[in-house]
Amino acid sequence: MLYPSIDKLLTIVDSKYKLVHVASIRSKQMLENNHYQMKEEEYTNKRTIGRALEELEKGLITVKKKSN
């Protein structure tokens, strides 16, 4: 079973494409800056992409809606 659940994440972000985009940007930031918003032992996932999704699920990353 994957954690966090995509169903739960899609209640935070309105599309799968935006979810992938946000997670990939945050994952790259983690790799480049070695900056994590939680302690190492608090993460369930070992890879940065999974950790980015965990941060999103916990509300540590906010996604702004684009205004037209």
Image (cartoon, rainbow, N blue to C red):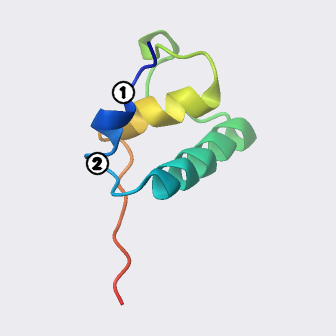
Q: CA distance from mark 2 to mark 1?
A: 11 Å
Task: In this rendered view, identify the residue nearer to me: 9 or 59.
Answer: 9
Residue 24 in the image: state x and y as whole percent.
62, 47
| In the image: residue 14, left or right of residue 45 | left
Task: In this rendered view, identify the residue nearer to me: 8 or 40.
Answer: 8
Q: Quadrant of residue 68?
A: bottom left
Q: Is residue 37 visible?
A: no
Judging by the rendered image, the residue that carries numbered circle 2 is 12
Q: Look at the picture and state if 36 lies above or below 27.
A: above
Task: In this rendered view, identify the residue nearer to me: 60 or 17.
Answer: 17
Which residue is rendered at x = 39% and y = 47% of the image? 61
Residue 5 in the image: state x and y as whole percent.
36, 27
* Amino acid type at mark 1: Ser
Which residue is rendered at x = 34% and y = 84% of the image? 67
Q: Residues within 10 Å of mark 1 (few under 14, many from 20)?
A: few
Instruction: Using the image, tell me which numbered label, if any, was put on residue 5.
Output: 1
Q: Quadrant of residue 65?
A: bottom left
